[in-house]
Amino acid sequence: MSVYPLATDDVGPIIDRVIAVLRASGLVIETNTMSTILAGEHEAVLSALRDASVAAMASGSAVMTITLSNACPLPDQHA
């Protein structure tokens, strides 16, 4: 999933808020510079995505993109 805050020059606080919400979900997450991978039970992932979108959009205009798959390998939990 990726979140793109709009109409702001300072995207850091919004992205940080979204990552904090995702970490609080208890799911396995892996972040990089352009996206975040979430791994877990389907309903838990959807719930975390909902909470993340609420957090992002509470700060202003934003776009969130997601790709759902049950065929990708899980992120390395020991990295």
Image (cartoon, helix red, strand yellow):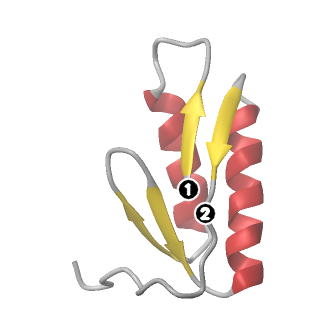
Q: Quadrant of residue 55?
A: top right
The quarter of the picture where residue 5 lies is top right
In x, y percent, where is residue 51?
74, 55
Quadrant placement of the C terminus: bottom left
As drawn, 40 above or below 11:
below
Image coords of residue 18 (percent x, y) = 58, 47
Given residues 79 and 68, the one toward you in this image is 68
In the displayed image of the protein, which residue is found farthest to the left? Answer: 79
- How far apart are the alpha carbons under marks 2 and 1? 6 Å
**Is 64 in front, or is 31?**
64
Upstream in sequence: badge 2 or badge 1: 1
Which residue in the structure is indicated by mark 1?
1
Decide if residue 12 is on the left or right side of residue 45. left
Callout 1 environment at 10 Å: few (<14), some (14 to 19), or many (20+)? some
Vertical comparison of 53 with 9: above or below: below
User: What residue is shown at x 37% (from left), y 80% (from top)?
Assistant: 75
- What's the residue type where badge 1 is placed? Met
| Dot 2 and dot 1 residues touching (CB under 8 Å) | yes
- Secondary structure beneath dot 2 equals loop
Viewer-nearest of discs 2 and 1: 2
Please name the amino acid that badge 2 sits on. Thr
